[in-house]
Image: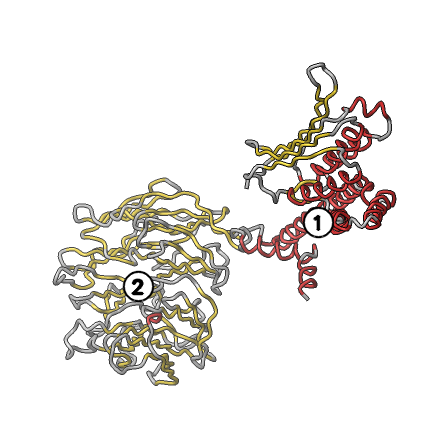
Amino acid sequence: MTNKIFLLFTNPFILSLVLSVILILSLPPFFDKYNIDEVKKIKTNESALINYCDLNSDGFSEEITIISSFKNRVGIIVREQNAVLNQWGFDGVLLRPENPIYCDINGDGLKEIAVFSLHENKILLNCFNPFSEEILIKDKVIDYFYPRNGQSSCSIRFCASVDANNDEINELYFSLSVGYPLKPRKIYMMDFKNDKLLASPEACIPINDPFSFRSNNEGDFYISTSTTAVGNCDSSAAFTDHFSWLMVLDKDLRFQFEPIKLGFYPSNLLIKPIRIEDQTFLAALNIYEGSKDHNCSISLINSEGKLEKEKNFDFSNDWYAAKLINKNNEFNELFIIRKDGLIEEVDENLNRKVIQQLLPFDESGARLNMLDIDMDVEDEFIFYHSDLEKVTITRNDFSNPLIFNAPGNNDLMYSTTILNGGNEPQLYLAFDNLAYYLNYYQNPLHNIKYLIYAGIYLGFYFLVFFIQKAQRLRTEHKYETEKKIAELQMKSIKNQIDPHFTLNIINSIGSLFAKQDTEKANYIFGKYSKLLRSTILSSENITSTLQEEIEYVENYIALEQYRFPDGFDYIIEKEVSINDKIKIPKMLIHSFVENAIKHGLKHLNKKGKLFIGVKNGSDKYKIVIRDNGVGRKKAKELAVFDTGRGLSIIDQILDLYYSFEKIKITYEMIDLTNEKNEAAGTEVIIKIPILKS
């Protein structure tokens, strides 16, 4: 079973597939459907913000510089294609965050600029057209704001620009909301044609995210808003913020019905319209964040304020600062964005389904804008993760999330699409520290990514195929080398196992038994059996350890001494520091010992001497084989043995061993002479490299 699995995963097709998948998964996002490139970035100035808007509908965005406060004045500078069109100044300091407001009030195709400022506790509205230079309204007092306890923030939110009273001039709906100063917390309508200002009834309801909707496709116009229960007002105040309220206003900013108490302090009530079968309902996501026994809930409420459906759920930290959104003006889809980055779709029965997972958000929850970045008539979503200093951009269905890093920034103050005529638009992101000009576009590599994946697979396949092919050739070469070495070694030991040698030994042993010299016969038989056993057991090996080789040689020498009585004596010396386990080619020492006995010592007229020494050098082991025989020249003259053939076999074995093991073993042969310069024997020095562990 294990072998089958191994064969399966080493199959070139399977192995290439596994490697391709690993590589593809580890690749940077080269093949994302959309890319974002940084064109340039500039340093932002909190007192001089830059906005972009196509004010005259010519396909090019004008650059609007807003000087929030200079000598207690708000300045507006409009540039058309880098040329200054004009500049305007107004009393006070700029209110934020959605200010100025750009909208076509009089229907002439040119957008007006509505600017809100705070001057001497008065909230002023100025509205003008930068092209026609028409002043629609000047220094209109909207309300009064008295900062308290160091709290000076007054938030303005755009709600709608719509001709609510059918006078062919759009009215401007917006909200003002404060924290501890408590007032103003209202929604307003500016009727430019009649210079008339309307405001919602007195209430302590915080206005967080006002929006307009119609009861059906052609129905009545209404306004509602998300609210919070923050507990700043007195509990006895009208519609106190100790509770969160559902508030719906008609076009004249009167209550459509008495505000409905839906949540308890502390809670966050998120309201969005949802259209079901041509009927518009309000979806209310109530998130209770306190410790009392109150549930969180999501509910549907009709235009008359009647509860249609409701589902409760338990609060968790992931619901803190969640967002409820529609993704288009059709109001037929509803989504929840949680702090942990989870996006859920809510159906008409209030069932929730997870559709996407983004990066998590900080304690303020999802910061998002909706912009048609690529001008395909559908808005993209821009999410800001302030603690991660990252921006996530998704398509209109939250697909294809793309992450842009914005290090060193804490707040995304403004975002818009810059129109460039016939050229591709740019995304403009203005943070508290830097502003980025970005190109957002469809990645051309996305459409050919599967071809590239196939190319990666084929590349791996051919790589694996050639590696395995090379491995097979190497294995075959290794096998042939081993086979050749073994054949040569078998030739070198042929004399030890051929019938002639064996019969001589057996006859000698038989003769000893006949003479009743059993002790010597047993000794010789033991040596021969060890020699034969070692030869047979190691027949499949091309190497042996140094210790095994020395033992083999000793057995061989003992037999040769018996065959040639009183022919020679021998000494084997080995330094203690020698590693007995080193591998050497089998029969290497034996071959030279055999030559020393047969070609040198055997022809002496006196008793010979054979010395075998193993020494430890700095980088090599040295094996010395020395005899006092007749010498190589005399041995050739006798022409009884073919010494050249034996040395040729040794040379071939060492060459093949080097190609196989990459260990270069060398030897040298020295002809010894006496003081009369007569042959006095032969010395062989074998050098074996010491491998570094």
Residue 192 lies left or right of residue 120; in this view the side is right
Looking at the rendering, which quadrant does residue 273 occupy? bottom left
Q: Is residue 80 above or below residue 316?
A: above
Locate the C terminus and report the quarter of the image it occupies. Answer: top right
Task: Give 33 or 250, whichever is nearer the viewer.
Answer: 33
Q: Indicate the position of residue 197 as horizontal and vertical percent values.
A: 23, 66
Question: Could one spot residue 96 in this view of the protein?
Answer: yes
Where is mark 2, residue-wise? 364
Picture quadrant of residue 338: bottom left
Residue nearest the viewer, comparing 8 with 576:
576
Instruction: Give me the C-alpha separation between circle 1 and circle 2.
Output: 58 Å
Image coords of residue 580 (percent x, y): 60, 43
Q: Earlier in the sequence, mark 1 or mark 2?
A: 2
**Amino acid at dot 1:** Gln
Give the quadrant of the N terminus.
bottom right
Furthest-top residue in this view: 676
Amino acid carrying mark 2 in the image: Ser
Q: Which mark is residue 468?
A: 1
Question: Which residue is nearer to you in this view: 568 or 333?
Answer: 568
Name the residue: 51% across, 54% down.
34
Q: Position of residue 89 (x, y in %)?
A: 23, 48
Horizontal and vertical percent position of residue 253: 27, 73
Residue at screen point 86% across, 26% down? 639
Which of discs 1 and 2 lies nearer the camera? The answer is 1
- Tags 1 and 2 in contact by the CB under 8 Å rule? no
